Amino acid sequence: MDESTGNKALTLHDDTWYITNGVLENFNGNGEKVVIIPPGVTEVDISAFLLEDEIETIIVSDTVKKLEYSSFDSLDSLKTLYLPDNGLQLCPGFICNCTSLKEIYLGENKLEFVTAAYEDDSEYTYLVTYAGDKSDVIVPDGYKEIGESAFRKNKNINSVALPQGITRVDSCAFKDCDNLS
């Protein structure tokens, strides 16, 4: 029970959705191409969307307040992700190995660089993924870490300039970037 509103948190267990107390724990898409996370979901758990090869678009409901690490993991066909502009907490690595992902929207704004922060250190910014289409990329100042899927399998990029403040680049951040010189 949500004390502030008096409403019960969403619980749903069926062939497609496994949601407990508002936490989306697992999704079984059965070939779905477009997925809309149901209203009432407040959090998407670790690996809730894992290896769902058919999904091309995910729309995150505005009731979602947190996307955990690897919420969207190894979704080979995912091209577009819509996130609500509601103060959503994006954990580092919430998108992982989604190498076809080219459009990410926060509200109505299309993002080029998708950023997350650690819960205990909002100043430590983490580049989750690059969703732009430039061949010569300049990562803006302020990033401290480049995540494992930030540029992975991006065939369009020729060069990437990193800011001085980078303290860590994951070993797979540029994996299979065939044109990167």
Image (cartoon, rainbow, N blue to C red):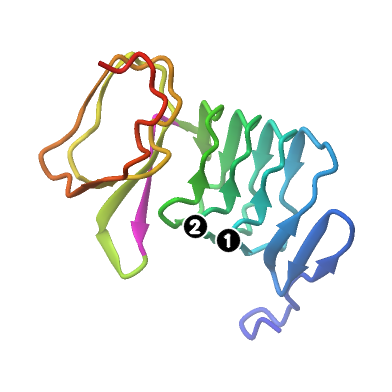
Q: Is residue 37 magenta?
A: no
Q: Quadrant of the N terminus?
A: bottom right
Q: Which numbered circle lies on residue 88?
A: none
**Disc 1 to disc 2: CB gap under 8 Å:** yes
Magenta span: 111-118
Report the front residue among 80 and 157.
Answer: 157
Res. 170 image quadrant: top left
Residue visible at 43% across and 39% down? 149
- The image position of residue 28, as x and y in percent, is 80, 50
Please give left or right for residue 178 compared with residue 96 in the image.
left
Earlier-in-chain disc, 1 versus 2: 1
Report the front residue among 58 and 54.
Answer: 54
Please give left or right for residue 26 compared with residue 152 in the image.
right
Q: Secondary structure at mark 2?
A: loop
Report the front residue among 84 and 49.
Answer: 49
| Image height of 75 relative to 121, above or below | above
- The image position of residue 141, as x and y in percent, is 17, 38
Residue 66 visible within the image: yes
Q: Which numbered circle lies on residue 46?
A: 1
Q: CA distance from mark 1 to mark 2?
A: 6 Å
Residue visible at 71% across and 82% down? 6
Q: Quadrant of the C terminus?
A: top left
Identity, as a three-letter code, of the amino acid under mark 1: Ile
Please give left or right for residue 154 compared with residue 100 in the image.
left
- The image position of residue 68, as x and y in percent, is 52, 60
Res. 157 image quadrant: top left
Check disc 2 and report the residue beneath it.
Answer: 69
Q: In terms of secondary structure, what is the magenta stretch mainly?
A: strand
Q: Is residue 112 magenta?
A: yes
